[in-house]
Amino acid sequence: MEDNRKVSIITPVYNAAKYITSTLDSVRSQTYQDWEHILIDDCSKDDSVKIIRDYIDKAKDDRIKLVVNESNLGAAKTRNKALSMCEGRYISYIDADDSWHENKLERELDFMSEKRAGFVFCDYEFADENLNPTGAVAHVPQELDYKGALKNTTIFTSTVIFDTKMIPKEKLEMPVIKSEDTALWWKLLREGIKAYGLGETLVTYRRPEKSLSSNKIEALRRIWNLYKNEGLHFYKRVWYFCFWAVNAVKRRV
């Protein structure tokens, strides 16, 4: 039987009409072509569904699959729904407003093989609303364990890829809480799984200027609540929170 080398790519969609076409383009431009792209619309109020359907019709690419939720499930449940549909050995994510460099999948799969790793992530660059790079790049550590991740939430969702031969797919379900992606990384690392960072910038993280201030405030709330959910003593929460804040600033400078 031929070895399954397919990558299943998950994208939750909510009001992403402005950006989803460039995200789809970045996936279809990959040098590694054995993939499926599962997009699940979570009751968008804009033209996201129409744009994706028109894109699929025009591209005539059956690797792109659109599912529309009947009711709003939120990001975690939507990602988990997509996970249940994945046919590939590898699981990857790209958010509906981000973009991959064309060799993202190829380089990460090579890196996984080199490291014999089940959990890989990479450097990423920040960009403005029009996907113009700001010059800031988040450089990731070569390896990351649980305690390291508590100090530095450097793993960005659109950079991650998993090998389900090493980490069973059922372990990749995201907790239904805010910052569900970070909560999943921590859960896996807490179980002794090691994450390996590829020091190459392969992902562009789009950050619209108008949302930055509110995002910062929300990020503070979410990280504090994540520490609380981990069952950390108050003073340990403060300790890790200080490390997190310093590293968060460094990533954006």
Image (cartoon, rainbow, N blue to C red):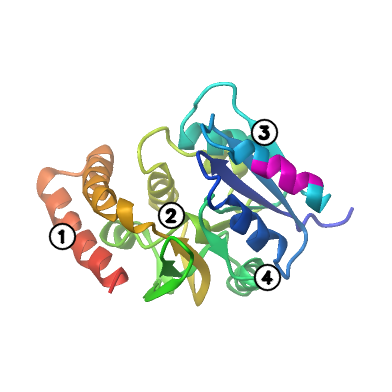
Front-most of residues 237 and 29: 29
Q: Residue 185 at x, y = what percent? A: 43, 51
The kind of residue tagged 2 is: Gly
In the rendered structure, which disc, 3 or 2, sits on the residue that comes first in sequence?
3
Judged left or right of residue 223, residue 179 is right
For the residue labelled by badge 4, is the local secondary structure a helix, a strand or a loop? helix
**Residue 233's quadrant in the figure?**
top left
Please state the total of marks drawn on the protein image: 4
Above or below, 240 relative to 174:
below
The kind of residue tagged 3 is: Val
Asked if the magenta segment contains residue 52, the reply would be yes
Q: Which mark is residue 242?
A: 1
Front-most of residues 61 and 140: 61
Say which residue label 2 marks. Answer: 192
Residue furthest toward the top? 70
What is the magenta range? 51-57
Judged left or right of residue 52, residue 183 is left
**What distance separates the C-alpha of mark 1 from that of mark 3?**
41 Å
Front-most of residues 216 and 148: 216
For the residue labelled by badge 2, is the local secondary structure a helix, a strand or a loop? loop
**What distance separates the C-alpha of mark 2 from that of mark 1?**
24 Å
The kind of residue tagged 1 is: Cys
Q: Residue 116 at x, y = what percent? A: 61, 68
Look at the image and tell me whether residue 197 can be seen: yes
Q: Main secondary structure of the magenta part?
A: helix
Q: Quadrant of the C terminus?
A: bottom left
- What residue is rendered at 41% in x and 53% in y? 189
Look at the image and tell me whether residue 61 can be seen: no
In the rendered structure, which disc, 3 or 4, sits on the residue that comes first in sequence?
3
- What residue is rendered at 51% in x and 61% in y? 159
